[in-house]
Image: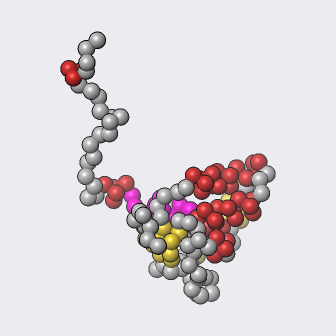
């Protein structure tokens, strides 16, 4: 099945796992050593988040404060994310090819939390605003942005 909107192929070179990270009282006191486990790999993703996905992210952010079920929230987030992550060429920590993630939340549940967080933000960071402006054409204002000419308004 072909997506109705263009997908984005995002290089995964910046996705890393921190080994030896130390957190005390919710604060990272030692960031550990980053290991870039997906250098030369990519993810093809739909660049649109569903409302359900945004709600799951919000629940995760509030989970520690509200005592919500973290595991259930992560499971639901993986289900939503598996609808946007169309394909990849990712390999596991032992170099084996990972199964394709589309409609497979179980595949996403096998990732580290750092890989999952990277995937959540991947579609929003594939290009800078300057790159986005290159080749774009200035659009006309919408009807909300147009001010009617006073002369053309009906008189009372």
Magenta segment includes 119: yes
Residue 88 vertical placement versus 153 (above, below): below
**Left or right of 30, for residue 128:** left
Which of the pair 11/51 is nearer the observer? 51
Q: Residue 82 appears at what percent x and percent y?
A: 58, 68
Report the residue that reaches farthest toward the top: 156
- Which stretch is magenta? 118-128
Picture quarter containing residue 60?
Answer: bottom right
Which of the pair 100/3 is nearer the observer? 3
Colour scheme employed for the rendering of this structure: secondary structure
Which of the pair 109/149 is nearer the observer? 149
Q: Residue 97 appears at what percent x and percent y?
A: 57, 86
| Residue at the (29%, 40%) spot, across then down | 141
| Residue at the (55%, 55%) spot, across then down | 50
**Left or right of 136, for residue 20:** right
| Residue at the (56%, 73%) spot, across then down | 102
User: Is residue 111 among the parts visible in the rendering?
Assistant: no
Magenta segment includes 131: no
**Left or right of 57, for residue 4:** left
Q: Residue 106 appears at what percent x and percent y?
A: 67, 74
Which quarter shows the C terminus?
top left
Picture quarter containing residue 115?
Answer: bottom right
Q: Residue 66 appears at what percent x and percent y?
A: 77, 48
Which of the pair 94/88 is nearer the observer? 88
**Left or right of 64, for residue 57:** left
User: Is residue 21 among the parts visible in the rendering?
Assistant: yes
Q: How many marks?
A: 0
């Amino acid at each position: 099945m072909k997506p109705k909107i263009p997908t984005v192929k995002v290089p995964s070179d910046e996705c890393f796992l921190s080994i030896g990270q130390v957190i005390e009282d919710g604060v990272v006191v030692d960031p550990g050593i980053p290991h870039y486990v997906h250098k030369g790999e990519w993810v093809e993703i739909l660049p649109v988040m569903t409302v359900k996905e945004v709600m799951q992210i919000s629940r995760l952010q509030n989970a520690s404060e509200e005592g919500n079920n973290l595991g259930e929230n992560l499971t639901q987030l993986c289900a939503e994310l598996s609808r946007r992550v169309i394909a990849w060429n990712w390999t596991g920590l032992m170099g084996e090819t990972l199964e394709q993630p589309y409609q497979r939340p179980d595949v996403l549940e096998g990732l580290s939390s750092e890989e999952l967080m990277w995937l959540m933000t991947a579609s929003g960071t594939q290009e800078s605003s300057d790159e986005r402006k290159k080749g774009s054409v200035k659009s006309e204002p919408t009807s909300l942005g147009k001010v009617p000419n006073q002369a053309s308004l009906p008189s009372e």
